[in-house]
Image (spheres, grey):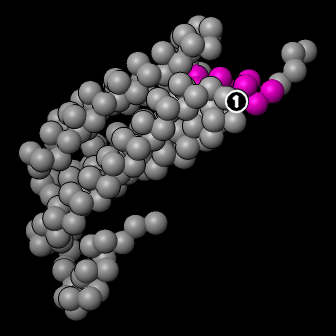
Amino acid sequence: MAEKTLKTVFIDELRDLYNSEQQLIKALPKVAKAATSEELRKGFEEHLQQTREHAARIEKIFGWLGEPVKGKKCKGMQGIVAEGGEVMSEDYEGAVMDAALITAAQRVEHYEIAAYGGVHAFATLLGEADAASLLEQTLEEEKETDEKLTQLSKQINQEALQSGVGGEVREMKPKQRAKAATARY
């Protein structure tokens, strides 16, 4: 049996990430179509292009490592994408749908931030400076996307609240409203 090393884990995680990106390349057009906010839809379309670049960067890293370009089924992303599909099948409308899509998209971003953070650390430790540089670039882009979603959610969540869809809206004090609008894990 071959010895398992940090490099083995690194390559395995890259394969997992590559499959994650491939799953997102298939899912993002559907998510963009479900968005009702023009700004949110455009954001999803832009992130699709970025996701294609992320996959291409992983392909480049595989080349540098002398590894075949292939993915390993990422069950974590598969579950997150399935949950996003459930959101889109709900009968949400307008800003309520957009608020739900943002929440689903942020789950994706947080998963990717964790994964890219790990492989970036491995690449750095293994002395794979070029790979570490590309992975850091992707990590920063994932963080930026998460922040853009957070910013969009402030307006969209407020619109969803004001729409009153799904029940009565409870009056909140300004401090409560501000805290709720920016709350995240």
Residue 169: x %, y % from top left = 19, 80
Question: Left of 114 or right of it: where is 155?
Answer: left
Question: Is the N terminus in the top left, top right, bottom left or bottom right quadrant?
Answer: top right
Tell which of 184 and 98 is nearer to you.
Answer: 184
The residue positioned 76% from the left and 30% from the top of the image is 6
The reply to whether residue 72 is in sight is yes
The reply to whether residue 104 is in sight is no
- Predominant secondary structure in magenta? helix
Q: 30 above or below 113?
A: above
Q: Which residue is mark 1?
A: 126
The question of residue 64 being in magenta is answered with: no
Q: How many discs mark residues in the rendered view? A: 1
Question: Left of 173 or right of it: where is 85?
Answer: right
In magenta, the rendered stretch is 5-16
Task: Name the image quarter holding residue 177.
Answer: bottom left
Pick out the residue farthest to the bottom.
Answer: 173
Q: 40 above or below 157?
A: above
Question: Left of 179 or right of it: where is 159?
Answer: left
Residue 82: x %, y % from top left = 42, 38
The residue positioned 22% from the left and 34% from the top of the image is 46
Q: 94 above or below 7?
A: below
Task: Name the image quarter holding residue 180.
Answer: bottom left
Tell which of 86 and 63 is nearer to you.
Answer: 63
Residue 38: x %, y % from top left = 9, 45
Pick out the residue farthest to the right.
Answer: 1
Task: Name the image quarter holding residue 57.
Answer: top left
**Which amino acid does the dot numbered 1 rest on?**
Leu
Tell which of 161 and 124 is nearer to you.
Answer: 124
Residue 45: x %, y % from top left = 20, 33
The question of residue 12 being in magenta is answered with: yes
The residue carrying pointer 1 sits among few (fewer than 14), some (14 to 19) or many (20 or more) residues within 10 Å by Cα, namely some
